[in-house]
Amino acid sequence: MSGHSKWNNIKRKKEATDAAKGKIFTKIGREITVVVREGGPDPNNNSKLRDLIAKAKANNVPNDNIDRVIKKAAGGEDKNNYENIVYEGYGPNGVAVIVECLTDNRNRTAGEVRHYFDKYGGNLGTIGCVSFMFSTKGIIILENTGLDEDTVMDDAFEFGADDLDFGDETVEIECAPENVHALREGLSGKGYTVLSAEVEQIPANYTTLTDEEHIKKMNLLLEHLEDNDDVQNVYHNWEMTE
């Protein structure tokens, strides 16, 4: 799991302003709306909804907000029809970028995403142009509060983990995408603090940027993509430095 830097992005989001936190609530709300329509409003019978509720709580979304979104989706009050769209492209100096969107207006989203790429030194490509450089994997992030590495390893592998990276502040656990739910629930049941449990796109190789202008533009590209309400996730192979 060397080189995996997703947690840096998560920390950056968690340290964001209240306005940015509001956008995170909006994005999770859209996800909840979709899974409620697909599998119903009862988290006991809808594992995807159960996972999203855990994600919302990990991002400090108030319970009232979560309940409101579920009830609105279940009652058909939210009339927006969201669809999943994935865009692929290149940032400055050929950095590979995947943008996952959940939108109720395909034309608006496509135009905005293309604009960001063009403005900040990249270009939007065709589907498949960079996704072959990534693998779909489940990533569980645990808070490390003096955990015992051998115990965590035993517990993680019990619930289907494939690999583990033990850090000073966090523990990153890698698994097959279909095992994310079982790992999150199993480790939570054993008392671990799960900071994040997601299916993510992990690059096989990373690109380093040394030109200051490239670094500036890449940061601006990521900031504008992540700030867009239609964009759910952004993955890239830029080797970010602290």
Image: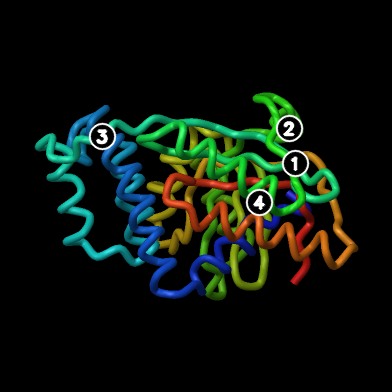
Q: Residues within 10 Å of mark 3 (few under 14, many from 20)?
A: some
Q: CA gap, disc 2 to disc 1? A: 8 Å
In terms of image quadrants, where is residue 128?
top right
Image position of 94 (left or right of 163): right
**Label pair 3/2, CB-CB below 8 angstroms:** no
Percent coordinates x, y for residue 100 in the rendering:
53, 39
**Label pair 2/1, CB-CB below 8 angstroms:** yes
Q: CA gap, disc 1 to disc 3? A: 36 Å
Q: Residues within 10 Å of mark 1 (few under 14, many from 20)?
A: many
N-terminal-most mark, 3 or 2: 3
The residue singled out by tag 2 in the image is: 130
N-terminal-most mark, 4 or 2: 2
Q: Residues within 10 Å of mark 4 (few under 14, many from 20)?
A: many
**Residue at 21% from the left image edge and 61% from the top image edge:** 63
**Residue at 34% from the left image edge and 58% from the top image edge:** 25
Task: In the rendered structure, find residue 46 and report the number of the disc placed on it.
Answer: 3
Image position of 205 (left or right of 15): right
Q: Secondary structure at mark 1?
A: strand
The residue singled out by tag 1 in the image is: 90
The residue singled out by tag 4 in the image is: 164
**Residue type marked 4:** Leu
Percent coordinates x, y for residue 134 in the rendering:
71, 35
